[in-house]
Image (tube, rainbow, N blue to C red):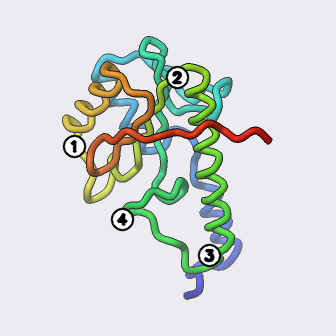
Amino acid sequence: MTDVHNKATRSKNMRAIGTRDTAIEKRLAGLLTQAGFDFRVQDAALPGRPDFVIDQYQCIIFTHGCFWHHHHCYLFKVPATRTDFWLDKIGKNVARDARDIAMLILQGWRVLVVWECALRGKMKLDDAGLTERLEEWICGGGQAAQIDTQGIHPFTVYPPHKA
């Protein structure tokens, strides 16, 4: 299947995709604020430039787009054009995510990934359910977890490899 846009239009569309203040980040920021958490955003001094840093609980929260970070859900679809390029690009994102999360944990941070599918789309979690899961993890502990349409799940992080 060929792309429905010419190269210039596709390039323009891709450049317009933001890396901060996205709709999913705004929704999560609103929920964290309503729940009474103080947080910093986009801390460039930390590995991976975390979307949210909650110093009081020594935790980091990333909002990951399901396509860009290859989540195994209904929002991820392998592109029909330039497939090798996209799989390589997304694979590098996944490897960088794993490295950054491992480095944050080594520095003493707890890390939560909130997937896009939990925040938007036909299967998203409602505000009350999402806030409950956020509060449960932030206040309750656990080193690394993720929230998706199925709820909250711990995950194992492997230490980064020495080059």
Cβ–Cβ under 8 Å for marks 1 and 2: no
Cα distance between the residues tagged 3 and 4 = 18 Å
Mark 4 vs mark 1: give the one in front: 4
**SS of the residue under disc 4:** loop
Mark 4 = which residue?
74
In primary-sequence order, the first of circles 4 and 2 is 4
Number of the label disc, if any, that sits on residue 83? 3
Q: Is residue 9 left or right of residue 38?
A: right
Question: Which residue occupies 66% across, 55% down?
Answer: 92
Task: Give the quadrant of the N terminus.
Answer: bottom right
Residue 70 percent coordinates (x, y): 51, 58
Mark 2, Cα crowd under 10 Å, few <14 / some 14-19 / many 20+, is many
Residue 109 percent coordinates (x, y): 52, 22
Question: Which residue occupies 63% across, 70% down?
Answer: 10
| Quadrant of the rendered image containing residue 152 | top left
Mark 1 vs mark 2: give the one in front: 2
Number of the label disc, if any, that sits on residue 109? 2
Q: Is residue 104 left or right of residue 115?
A: right
Question: Which residue occupies 46% across, 19% down?
Answer: 54
Cβ–Cβ under 8 Å for marks 2 and 3: no
Mark 1 = which residue?
126
**SS of the residue under disc 2:** loop
Mark 1 vs mark 3: give the one in front: 3
In primary-sequence order, the first of circles 4 and 1 is 4
Cβ–Cβ under 8 Å for marks 3 and 4: no
